[in-house]
Amino acid sequence: MTQSSRFTVAIHILTLLAHGGPEPRTSEYIAGSVNTNPVVIRRLLASLRAARLVASQSGPGGGWQLLREPEAITLGMIFQAVEGAALIPMHASEPNPRCPVGRHIQTALAGIFRGAEQALLDQLDRTTLAQLVKDVEGLAS
């Protein structure tokens, strides 16, 4: 199993855009901050654009900007924009229905997983991008 860093990188992108003010930032500039390939950044920006969190502007002086004020963007919104799927997925293949555990394990886990995912989203929705920018700026001084 591998863990995804999409959520963390998406937060980094949006924090950078919020910190920089209204000036558009290119995917190359953002990639330099994240220390990754601009293609990775563009893929995440596409998801963030689909969620109406960012917009792009082409041409000279173009780049990416926030569509909403940082106070109106929560970490939960960012998570849902880039992760989408279940946080804790069930088995990749159906367990053996002839096994007493295999037959019932997914049903037994479903409610627990839904509750854990909801608790995480509730926590993430309590933090805005503006709060994170403030925290980053506080650490930088």
Image (spheres, grey):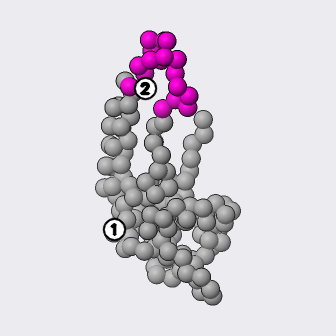
In the picture, the disc for residue 29 is none
Query: Can you say whether 111 is above or below 79 in the image?
Result: above
Q: Residue at x 55, y 81 (%)?
A: 57
Q: Secondary structure at mark 1?
A: helix
Q: Position of residue 128 (x, y in %)?
A: 35, 62
Q: Which residue is at 46% across, 57% downward? A: 81
Label 2 element class? helix
Mark 1: few, some, or many residues within 10 Å (few <14, many ≥20)?
few
In the rendered structure, which disc, 1 or 2, sits on the residue that comes first in sequence?
A: 1
User: Mark 1 and 2 residues: CB-CB less than 8 Å, in contact?
Assistant: no
Residue 69: within the magenta?
no
- Tell me if residue 126 can be seen: yes
Task: Please state which amino acid type lies under the numbered disc 2.
Answer: Gln
Give left or right: position of 93 versus 35.
left
Q: Residues within 10 Å of mark 2 (few under 14, many from 20)?
A: some
User: What residue is shown with label 2?
Assistant: 106
Quarter of the view holding residue 107: top left
Task: Please state the horizontal and vertical placement of residue 133, each as a whole percent of the image.
Answer: 42, 67
Eye-nearest disc, 1 or 2:
2
Q: Label 1, label 2: how many angstroms apart (C-alpha)?
A: 36 Å
Q: Nearer the viewer, residue 127 or 138?
A: 127
Q: What residue is at 33 percent from the left and 55 percent from the top?
A: 125
Q: Which residue is mark 1?
A: 72
Specify start and end residues of the magenta stretch as a single range: 90-107
Looking at numbered disc 1 in the image, what kind of residue is underneath it? Ala
Q: Is residue 92 magenta?
A: yes
